[in-house]
Amino acid sequence: MFYNFFKVLLQFPLKALSGKIDEDGTGVGIVNGDPTLERIARGNGLALYAGGSWTAGFASQLEEIVADAERLTGSRPNILIDVSKVTRLDTFGAWLIERLRRSLAHGEAEAKIAGLSRDYSSLVDEVRRVKAIPAAEVPTVTITGILDQVGRTMFGIGGTVIDLIDMLGAVLTASARVLRHPGSFRLTSTVHHLEQVGWRAVPIVILITFLIGCIISQQGIFHFRKFGADIFVVDMLGVLVLREIGVLLVAIMVAGPRMLALIIALPILAFLGAMAALYSGGLVAWLYGGVDPEAFLLRLRDAISINHFIVGIVKAPVMAAVIGIVACVEGLAVQGSAESLGQHTTSSVVKGIFFVIVMDGVFAIFFASIGM
């Protein structure tokens, strides 16, 4: 008898320091405010007595205590969680207590929290109002599911194309109406939006195309120099800028839902961007590659023709129309919320860039087929 008494007495401090529930359900004491959770069977019911400091400072201990309690309790009809001995409680601790209550209250089992002080009752009530989010089910990857996703994606692309064609028809109808009734054309509004889309975009367009011209020229000279062909950077720069880079960069940078202003402004901006890129390319070729400006201009005259300029200028208004149509479709799809506005603005930019690049590829194939 005395042997058993001293055995329990010697074991008690070790359990108290652990701050956890042991396998036989024996409770633990409070040492230096450490969190504890004592488990006591009460007939068909179960009582859990929480004590100590249930705060974020003891996060690892609390997580382990609650996880142990969730594993050891089993299913009982009546469960009581007594928190009268909890000395400190914050939102983290309150959530763990509520989590424990929810995990124990399954099926016919009922779990209650008792012993809440006036200071902590409102905190636990607020945490209780938070709805538990069910774990997301990981979808099983199957051939049928993949085909279904592909079909939905293609259906969405088809819907987008139909919307764009519908908007193109509306634009053509409106243009025909203006041609029949010139008095309905709003010149003041057109000039205003032309100033917004065109004139105000000139600084950023020139800056970006200037830098791109510098990069193309520097990289071209760096690599052509290995073959002793520095001068051919002029050919590359002239063709790329006039046919592709100039108009493509400007089309990506410019955005707006005003069709006519875009169609007028984009060719002008493309021309200014091309001139800025050619100037910066010549500057880098002179300072970095040692190509004399006069030699650069002579080589440029021989490398390019009027066809290269025409290709870029023809692309510009078509790309402007594509950007305007995409922007109009997405703008009309905006609903009455800031979230919808942000989503469709992003969608407009992404789709606009995508269709501009697609049209650039179509033009490349077309001009190659006719020898330009």
Image: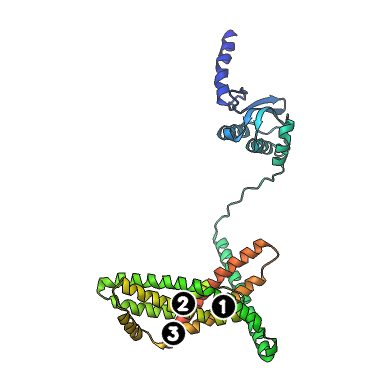
Is tag 1's residue or tag 2's residue first in the polypeptide sequence? 2
Marks 3/2: CA distance?
12 Å
Q: Position of residue 242 (x, y in %)?
A: 43, 80
Circle 3 residue: 309
Image spot of residue 291 (x, y percent): 29, 76
Q: Amino acid at mark 2?
A: Gly
Q: Which mark is residue 322?
A: 1
Q: Secondary structure at mark 2?
A: helix
Q: In the image, is residue 108 above or below residue 341?
A: above
Along the line of sight, the residue nearer the viewer: 236 or 126: 236
Name the residue at 47% across, 79% down. 272
- Judged by depth in the image, the label closer to the viewer, 3 or 1, is 3
Quadrant where the C terminus lies?
A: bottom left
Residue 46: image location, x then y, percent? 70, 28
Q: CA distance from mark 1 to mark 2?
A: 20 Å
Rendered position, 286 above or below 25: below
What residue does disc 2 label?
273
Q: Earlier in the sequence, mark 3 or mark 2?
A: 2
User: Which residue is rendered at x = 32% and y = 74% of the image?
Assistant: 286
- Residues packed near mark 1 inside 10 Å, few (<14), some (14 to 19) or many (20 plus): many
Callout 3 amino acid:
Phe
Question: Considering only order in the chain, which callout, 1 or 3, is on the residue closer to the N terminus?
Answer: 3
Q: Residue at x 55, y 23 (%)?
A: 17
Q: Is residue 33 visible?
A: yes
Left or right: 194 with respect to 120?
left
Name the side, left or right, on which 91 lies relative to 274. right
